[in-house]
Image (cartoon, coloured by chain):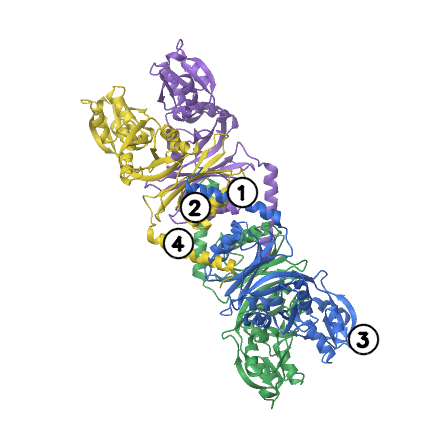
Chain colours: A blue, B green, C yellow, D purple
Amino acid sequence: MSTTVAYLGPAGTFTEAALLKLRSTGVFGTSEITPLAVSSPALALDAVRSGEAAFACVAIENSVDGPVTPTFDALSAGEGVQIYREVDLDIAFSIMVRPGTTLEDIKTLATHPVGYQQVKGWMAENIPAAEYRSASSNAAGAEAVAEGRVDAAAAPERAAALFGLETIADNIADFSGATTRFVAVGPRGVPTPRTGNDRTSVVFSLPNEPGTLVNALTEFAQRGVDLSRIESRPTRRKLGSYNFHIDLIGHIDDTPLAEALRALWLRTEDLVFLGSWPAETGEGGEDKLAADLARLEQATQWVNNAREGKE
Amino acid sequence: MSTTVAYLGPAGTFTEAALLKLRSTGVFGTSEITPLAVSSPALALDAVRSGEAAFACVAIENSVDGPVTPTFDALSAGEGVQIYREVDLDIAFSIMVRPGTTLEDIKTLATHPVGYQQVKGWMAENIPAAEYRSASSNAAGAEAVAEGRVDAAAAPERAAALFGLETIADNIADFSGATTRFVAVGPRGVPTPRTGNDRTSVVFSLPNEPGTLVNALTEFAQRGVDLSRIESRPTRRKLGSYNFHIDLIGHIDDTPLAEALRALWLRTEDLVFLGSWPAETGEGGEDKLAADLARLEQATQWVNNAREGKE
Amino acid sequence: MSTTVAYLGPAGTFTEAALLKLRSTGVFGTSEITPLAVSSPALALDAVRSGEAAFACVAIENSVDGPVTPTFDALSAGEGVQIYREVDLDIAFSIMVRPGTTLEDIKTLATHPVGYQQVKGWMAENIPAAEYRSASSNAAGAEAVAEGRVDAAAAPERAAALFGLETIADNIADFSGATTRFVAVGPRGVPTPRTGNDRTSVVFSLPNEPGTLVNALTEFAQRGVDLSRIESRPTRRKLGSYNFHIDLIGHIDDTPLAEALRALWLRTEDLVFLGSWPAETGEGGEDKLAADLARLEQATQWVNNAREGKE
Amino acid sequence: MSTTVAYLGPAGTFTEAALLKLRSTGVFGTSEITPLAVSSPALALDAVRSGEAAFACVAIENSVDGPVTPTFDALSAGEGVQIYREVDLDIAFSIMVRPGTTLEDIKTLATHPVGYQQVKGWMAENIPAAEYRSASSNAAGAEAVAEGRVDAAAAPERAAALFGLETIADNIADFSGATTRFVAVGPRGVPTPRTGNDRTSVVFSLPNEPGTLVNALTEFAQRGVDLSRIESRPTRRKLGSYNFHIDLIGHIDDTPLAEALRALWLRTEDLVFLGSWPAETGEGGEDKLAADLARLEQATQWVNNAREGKE
């Protein structure tokens, strides 16, 4: 039986490429995948929440443009979903046109706003007169070219073949080494087992009092748990009122991280767990995990001995 | 003589309304303003850096969509500019069309992506079949309607008159009370005098070591200086490498804040000062400032007496 | 069968009075006590370590002279003993002499050095020419009077009757309200159950690196565990090398305190548990304990739900 | 003209030896010293406060017995005095008797209580039956031997000659390498110039609220100022109410230390400055001082530039 995975479509997007890469990690439990193309990260997560899809594949962070805020807002908009895996994808664009179009012919170029951040330097240099048109995805931009609505698209190479277009420039990227991180999101469930090199993500809000943010972050620092990212996102209630999204190095089954989260719960007004999963990058691993566990076990034993009156 | 102020044009944007509100604060030093419409926050700041404009008026934060990241990226992209003042503007949209167009006729609606976040709920309910088209500003969307390129725009009421359009719905906002904060940016200079209710903004990067973020933030917390906002923005060098933008409650002429910044400088790889200016919201004021100064003066006197051998 | 309890003798000391008060708390498990008088706190603890006595009663802190350092040094000199209970005793001295002696006759006055701190003001005023002689206990001072070796002693009233002396002044105390805290020390064992108003004591040493002391204390502060006392005692290895003795508000069965101790273990070179026992003073109690437990249970439940994939 | 220096007499004490060592540092401003023997650290400081002596030389800390609490209590008992210099003295005792006395003849041995802590092991082994008699100083013990009041004294070698006694054992010390630190105390005045390797001492009390001690100590830790010692001394008001004595690495003319003290003043109920003076031990020095100053100067320049609108 096949598993449905929602993604930002149509076929030919970077998200589709990420979906295929995620499939190879085994996170979907099968390699029989039915891709379900939707038009936004929010709709992809809605498909998981409604049961229409078993998983969603969404972009979460980009090395050039930062966090993909629609994904973050969709993740924290409701309970019921959780991140199970991440993959990093090198992002390079091809400029594709209908066969016969030349650089000089390009009056309009469509791509996703995040993609635009990565090709606008190239546009200014090569087609300075061309106008940018926003597309809901890079592949949707290619589709618009095929349909004659715009002249060119910046999209993954693969989209040219899918939509019968011609590539007139490739490997376009204003910042070399641009990477996007995608995650597999499923319904609330037991996290994948810890590997010694994991990432955990939570969202929380704090009482509007001096020092609450530093006190909250100190719960992690004091226990040696590192933050890899912090964002404040508006609560949409009033200007200056925020939710905080943080990524932590470690797994909820790591004692220091779990105890830090428990302490955080006591300080927050609202705390949402977005998952613990294996990190693509990082320096941990099974050896470090085993060493940390052994040392912590000694400390726990010390406390237990004291409680039980043993030497 | 008139002072040139760059802003996100064309005429009719919220940014233009903010510019007029900023003019009334006196921050431009004159009420004789020559508005210079440009097509992005980055170009507005470039106009200040090049001397083409004396000031720029740019949106910095929105209560629904959060920080206006292009503004942040433009502010930290280079030295030489500084924030001098802020104003908060209530954001309400009107839906405008060419005379005679009805709701049913609307196939395409243009507005700025941030504006789209605030009207998409209304669109789903009232014109579910209409397609969203990205515009470089809300007024540019209205202009596109006037030119017949799209059917409708979500823009400030004032844009309808400017472009000869008809309003078919107004006060549209998915989130009531939506507010955007705009700032006046000028060339590097002496900040405005402190008022007891000020805001200070800096950008910095940190060595990639455990605990550096909490240690940096503790410099403020320990001295009683509150953070009102924190963002991590990618450095564009590699995934997971960030600059931090923070807003602080207080002025660089406040001793605790100045000493915290000096301590922060010692911890950072790079520290950029984006200005100290009067805050629109907040609970400080001259009385609190005077009381704080008096108490600090006593503490300083204690140290001086010890240094000089006086009782 | 009777239980042997070592104490700083001879009969008639404040320590003997404290022993009787401790007996009434039930800490000795019986009211059949065989007091064993010894000449120092160290010898009292040695009696427990060797099994000669089941418990020791020793003074630990005085409101005028501070920590009773010989007791602290004896507690941390070796493993194997633990505090089970405390009692506070008001300290008031009587001046006692052989029958017929007058104030003018007093050339020498004997008492314990800690007692001397509390009567030296009285001596300066009333018998300025008299010389102080150190005694191993206040009652030993009274005994020395009885044996004719000194002229007067400052000791508990009860010692006058025991040694056939006459009181010529009573309720002597340079500082009114002077109090001494005594503790019941037994062999290593399971602490008494928590009461919601407990005290815990530990001794530790730290790596000689900057910031280690504050980091260690922050383990408690961050978890809301209060310190009631801190001492640095020389390790006797070199000048400036210390062990730290701290008293904490709470019980090792309180989760925050236990986790703070576990974290402390990871930071220390050596950590000795000196017991958890009911505090004589303090504001806790069963209600607060129950409320804290309930809230902590909610936080733990949040973590468990996240681990198990439950909402 | 000669300068009067009060010390714990009589001649022959370790304190007298320390006085001579302090004289050689130049702290007294002259080498013409008139020693004034008094019978306690409190009386030595009183002599300075009253003007009878220009300086006092008092023991402050011992590597075996820890802080010399009478000195601490005398320092914090009133304002008006300050530490200007320290010297460390190796402590080794000689056992001295009247000529002709043998080990077997010794029934009583007198020395200061701190000295007793260092010879009691030797006594237990060599003269187990002898009784300890407290003396106000080690030399006073030697004097008592000369007067026939006790049989032996543990005192500095030099005391034997002064009092016509015979040494029957020397270099006695239960802990090898025992050292005592002595300080020169004068009236309130300007501290000696910083050397890059200084020590600063303060006494303070804190509001009786959770976390105040850690918050106070964090003022130093956060600024990189190390504590070399901490004591809690009872305020003599009630059990569990303390003053804190801390020694800091650095000089009040060091900016971080001065700012930490200023911040501490804002947190304390009472803050007494006991002086900044050159440390005998430590790793600082002029090179480190110059490097720290240069880096701090850069940070200060950054703040000043921001305040003045310079790049």
- Labels 2 and 3 touching (C-beta < 8 A): no
Q: Residue furthest top?
A: D100
Task: Look at the numbered disc 1 and give the secondary structure of its residue.
Answer: loop
Residue A127 position (above or below residue C111): below
Instruction: Determine the CA span between mark 1 and mark 3.
Output: 69 Å
Disc 1: which residue: D254
- Disc with the residue nearer the chain's start (2 vs 1): 2
Residue type at tag 1: Asp
Task: Look at the numbered disc 2 and give the secondary structure of its residue.
Answer: helix
Viewer-nearest residue: D176 or A6: A6
Q: Which mark is residue A102?
A: 3
- Labels 2 and 1 touching (C-beta < 8 A): no
Task: Look at the numbered disc 4 and give the secondary structure of its residue.
Answer: helix
Disc 4: which residue: C293
**What count of labels does the image hold?**
4
Q: Nearer the viewer, mark 2 or mark 3?
A: 3
